[in-house]
Image: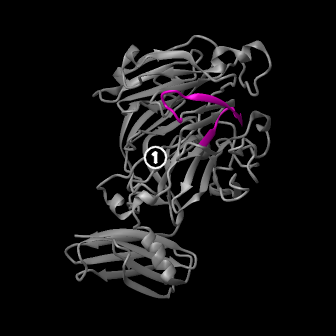
Amino acid sequence: MMKKLFLLCVLFLPLVLSAQFSNRIWCFGDSAGIDFSNPSSPTTFTSSMDCRGSCCSIADSANQLLFYAHTGNLNLWYSPCYCGAQVVNKNHNQMLNGDSLLGDPCYNQMAIVPFPQDSSKFYLFHLSVSTLEGFRYSIIDMTLDSGKGAIIQKNISVTDTELFSGMTAIKNGNGRDWWVIYHNSNASTGGLPTNDFYVLSITPFGIQGPFIQSIGELSSSDAGSIKFSHKGDKLIFINAEGLIDLFVFDRCTGIISNHLNIMHEFTPYPAYFGCEFSSNDSILYISTAEEVPKILQFDLSAANIASTEDTVAAPIIPAYSGGYLSLAPDNKIYWSRAATYYMTYNYPYPDTAWAFEPVAMNLSVINNPNSLGASCNFQLNSFYLGGARTYYGLPNNPDYNMPALGGSLCDTLGYPNQVQSIKPQTPNQLNVFYHPDWQTAFINASGLAGRNYGLHIVDITGKEIFSESGSLTSQYYTKDFRCQDLKDGMYLVLFETEKDRLVKKFVKE
């Protein structure tokens, strides 16, 4: 019992105890690396990255590299499973057990999320677009191999289906937990368009979900990008068929809502590739992979956002060279492009002159992304990579320093409230509904796998105010908990069996 109460009390510890990490070290492309420790004067370094597309990296609070990862390469394109994804330690060597991760060589298909309850462990999420390997994760323990880290669990399955090429992660509004978002692919539905978002909740109790939310226009593509705004209250979804959808995102509940379509599919067919918000979230930028790649700009404050479309960059050559966009710690947006010489697949680069063109040796930069039109100050091939080269991808790193939503319910309680308008794909769930007139909290658990249960209710200080245990005769549990003697405030309900652990909160008013 004391162990359980200690775990519950941990939920209420001040959020400032959460470990901080950094997005200031980038590793990508062909041995490229950028150190943004001093945002006013970023420097380059040589990494051991070998990646055409998906990559991610993480540093500690002192901006010292911890590790980075990338998906497989095209030499493995025709293997039964794309087992070329790799994790690399801070010394630029393969991490212990850091090979053979499932994942194919597309884009924005990896993300690193710290354990909410253990600053030495990390989830590495990785997905596949073209195979049934689907969505997976591996676990990294940085206490191993003399602090260089090791993978202790690998390729754990979450969703076994073809998926959209892109994922994103964001801190929960409590400042400690995380949300991970990805999208279904039309390949998994027999070619039929889909609008299913998958939402994972990452808490001290592990990974919950995926929760499926069907919202937005139907997508007919498995390529594009998903990005959060920098305040975390907006989510953009674009695909290669020309779709642009904007949503409101609730960091406390994980709910995606208020769908606003900016562009429909196929009107026109611009091959949208990457997207990014300006640092104040007022302007949206989208890169294309057309024969003449472009960067398009949209004013998100306009009544008709689509009508504000403006081309701020349209380099003519080489063809098919448009890559991803990413806002850096210096508040500039960087655009990665690849030298192609009209090749469909240009990995690895050959040792010929065209593979050392400026497009491969530099990133292009939007220097003032909060300004409309030419005032955004786009400069083509203006950031030299120090002799390294880039392809299409840039690190898919979340904002590790995003603050809690001060004053919100989830900030105060320190635990997400999963609203029931999202439907869980996993069978077990806990519902708690408080009726103020009846002064009763109705507690229902269903889909339970275990047979011996414990119910614990604690207040905001972590003090247990009620507990109950017993045996179940079915997969269901229900209780009407009378609250007339409780003070107004927030309470946490923990229901667990030998195979289930479910948590909910309610507010007595």
Q: Residue furthest left?
A: 437
Q: Is residue 54 magenta?
A: yes
Q: Which residues are magenta?
A: 37-57
Residue 4, position as x, y percentages in the image: 49, 78
Image quadrant where residue 509 sits: bottom left
**Along the viewing direction, whichever of 121 and 509 lies nearer the viewer:** 121
Q: Which residue is mark 1?
A: 401
Closest to the observer: 287 or 36?
36
Instruction: Name the residue at the bottom extreme.
Output: 470
Q: Viewed as shown, does residue 240 lie left or right of 371?
A: right
Residue 194, placed above or below residue 296: below
- Where in the figure is residue 116, as x and y percent of width and height? 51, 59
**Amino acid of disc 1:** Asn
Instruction: Looking at the picture, tell me which residue is in the foreground, 367 or 240.
Output: 367
Where disc 1 sits, the SS reads loop
Asked whether residue 482 is drawn in magenta, I would say no
- Answer with left or right where residue 264 lies relative to residue 52: left
